[in-house]
Image (cartoon, rainbow, N blue to C red):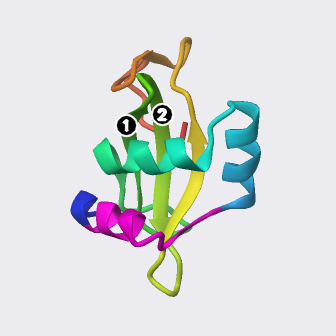
Amino acid sequence: MDIELIKEKTRLNQFILSGHAHKERQEEEIEIKHIKEALLNGEIIENYPNDPRGPSCLISGFSENRPIHLVCGWTKFNWLLIVTVYIPKPPKWVDSKTRATKAKKGGE
């Protein structure tokens, strides 16, 4: 996936959140403005080209000095699909870019 295209779609507001992403963002108190900010300053830290739902990636970004992770893919209409969003924290994450274990998974 291409981070510059992801940022362009974000700037154009051409993104949607899955039901799961909406639920997770509410539980983590992440607002839409935080999602946009994290996407615009974020970077791809993992790619999932063989995800059964379609190619996706994990983006690590920040909003208000808080790290935010977003798993993103594409809709059939070429909009950015935010599959999930969460705050990376132990025990799964050492910091915003380092997993606590070396096992790479298709999501959090």
Q: Is residue 15 left or right of residue 7?
A: right
- Residue at image position (44%, 82%) is 78
Question: Label 1, on which residue?
Answer: 61
Rendered position, 5 above or below 87: below
Q: Most extreme residue toward the bottom, as rendered?
A: 77
Q: Are marks 1 and 2 in contact (CB under 8 Å)?
A: yes
Judge whether residue 82 is colored magenta.
no
Q: Is residue 22 left or right of residue 97?
A: right
Q: Quadrant of residue 5?
A: bottom left
- Residue at image position (41%, 22%) is 65
Q: Which residues are magenta?
A: 5-17
Identity, as a three-letter code, of the amino acid under mark 2: Ile
Rendered position, 63 above or below 98: below
Judge whether residue 13 is colored magenta.
yes
Count how many numbered circles sit on residues in the image.
2
- Residue at image position (30%, 43%) is 41
Q: Position of residue 25 (x, y in %)?
A: 67, 41
Q: Position of residue 31 (x, y in %)?
A: 62, 42
Rendered position, 4 above or below 100: below
Q: Quadrant of the C terminus?
A: top right
Question: Label 2, on which residue?
Answer: 68
Identity, as a three-letter code, of the amino acid under mark 1: Gly
Q: Pointer 2: residues within 10 angstroms few (<14), some, or many (20+)?
A: many
- Residue at image position (33%, 44%) is 46
Mark-to-mark CA distance, 1 and 2:
5 Å
Q: Secondary structure at mark 1?
A: strand
The reply to whether residue 37 is visible in this rendering is yes
The reply to whether residue 106 is visible in this rendering is no
Label located before the other in sequence (1 or 2): 1
Which residue is at the front of the view, 22 or 20? 22
Q: Position of residue 76 (x, y in %)?
A: 52, 85
Q: Position of residue 33 (x, y in %)?
A: 53, 47
